[in-house]
Image: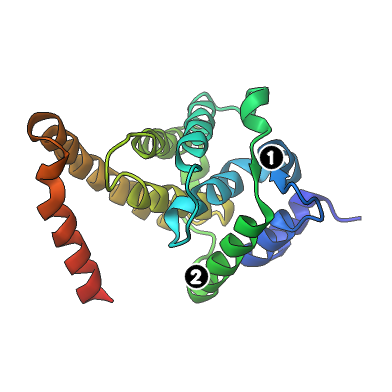
Amino acid sequence: MQSTEDASQALPLGETLQELLNTDDSRGLSINEITFAVGEKGFGLLLIVLSLPSALPIPAPGYSTPFGVVMALIALQMIRGRKAIWLPKKLGTIRIKPKLAKTMLGTASKFLSKVERCIRPRQKWIRGRTGQACLAFIVLNMACLMMLPFPLTNTLPAIVIFMIGVGLSEDDGLLAIGAFVVGCCALLLYAGIVYIVLTQGVEAIEPIKDWIKSRVAIGG
């Protein structure tokens, strides 16, 4: 019988997420259950799952802060070089509602179906202790940003964590490095935003929000 880890390595990432998040439990899957299911590939896959509600355009209020806390703890354990994930009991019992999980899967599957042909094992040295610690540093900072009660501190950090998770899960070091660079740029951006909020108030960043929305609209 194929182990969970072997199966996850054999399946495309979209199908792995499908296998992972499907459940007959009306309460939905808990983070502990997901952590157990992904085994040693837990860091990457768990980061993907936890970042999805904020990274993708789906309504999921109330998840950014608790999931940000969990991802920060995961990052600290990556920095320490742990192979298995440990979470406090209270955080591990947080559940992803079945309706949200279904929406997450649908949105993620569409995205991954477009990019999976470009994802492949390369630059595997990033999975070493030093490389993983550098990625974890960015994950930690992005997770902390997600917990801040400021506008614009959810989506971009979550996307960075999502892409790092994909890179780790698929052994695509080049993708992970790209996400690392974007994360460093995001840190500079949000440092500026936090400074503006602290010195001039939240309303001072409205022009920045409008500019970002206009650039997204042009890009779309």
What colouring method underlies this structural image?
A: rainbow
Q: Position of residue 214 (x, y in %)?
A: 17, 68
Q: Which residue is mark 1?
A: 35
Q: Which residue is mark 2?
A: 111
Q: Position of residue 202 (x, y in %)?
A: 17, 39
Tell me the amino acid under the disc marked 2: Phe
Q: Residues within 10 Å of mark 2 (few under 14, many from 20)?
A: few
Q: Earlier in the sequence, mark 2 or mark 1?
A: 1
Tell me the amino acid under the disc marked 1: Thr
Position of the N terminus, as image quadrant, is bottom right
Q: Is residue 154 above or below residue 133?
A: below
Q: Position of residue 34 (x, y in %)?
A: 70, 44
Residue visible at 52% across and 23% down?
80
Q: Is residue 84 visible?
A: no
Q: Nearer the viewer, residue 76 or 133?
A: 76
Q: Is residue 75 above or below residue 158?
A: above
Q: Is residue 97 visible?
A: yes
Q: Nearer the viewer, residue 159 or 5?
A: 159
